[in-house]
Amino acid sequence: MDIQVLMIAVAVIAAIILIAIGVWYFVRQKRSEKLRERFGPEYHHAVRTLKNRDVAESELREREKRVSQFHIVPLPPAECTRYQHSWMAIQSEFVDHPETAVASANQLVREVMERRGYPVAGFEQSAADLSVDHPAVVENYRAAHQISERSQRGAADTEELRQALVYYRALFQDLLGNGAPITEKNNLEHAREHNGKTIRID
């Protein structure tokens, strides 16, 4: 009789353990799914970079916690218009001075970030902060930054600089639209004529 009671107790304990494991696994999967939906391609970038899903997910949660403490604000329409005009001036400048235009684009993006409420810290921290609310375009920011650094060393050609401007523009538009596409009316020109030359920013 005692053996039967013991066997029943063991079976009950085993069942409880299995249920607990199942609940833990379910919660873990739902938490991972939520992070994948929130961060999109940035989730996979973090996993690839950190080479461990648990570590990557912990990092992404820390980003969420950090950014939740910021006071992120949308920009008034008048400011959006002013920034768009600044961007078009940069885009026109690219024709004759591509290196300067790319540097100006980087500076303008950082200005908009700061105006929105993101601390302008080191590049890696800034990219991590942006990834919480702008995960679809933060990789563009990284690519643009790499080209910009090569440009400072004189190692980037005109085509790379053009691509950097495209990357910066993607983030710039996303910041102005608070993560949503800006309207076609306010969209930036894809080509500018200057001194008989055309530069396409597609």
Image (cartoon, rainbow, N blue to C red):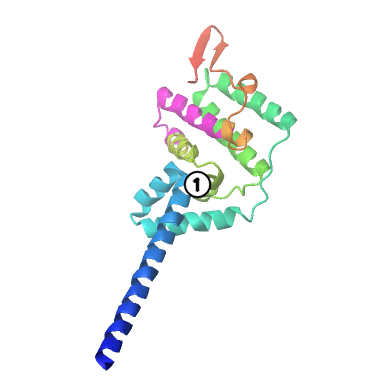
Image quadrant in which the N terminus is located: bottom left
* Image label count: 1
Q: Is residue 170 magenta?
A: yes
Q: Is residue 175 left or right of residue 144?
A: right
Q: Amino acid at mark 1?
A: Arg
Image: 176 above or below 73: above
x and y, in percent, of residue 36 in the image: 44, 48
Graded by Cα atoms within 10 Å as few (under 14), some (14 to 19) or many (20 or more), the crowding at tag 1 reads some
x and y, in percent, of residue 55 in the image: 40, 59
Point 28% across, 93% down: residue: 2
Give residue 32's quadrant in the image: bottom left
x and y, in percent, of residue 183 in the image: 62, 24
In the image, farthest residue toward the front: 1
Image: 132 above or below 80: below
Q: Magenta region, mostly helix, strand or loop?
A: helix
The residue that label 1 is drawn on is 38
Point 50% across, 46% down: residue: 38
Range of magenta residues: 150-172
Q: Is residue 122 magenta?
A: no
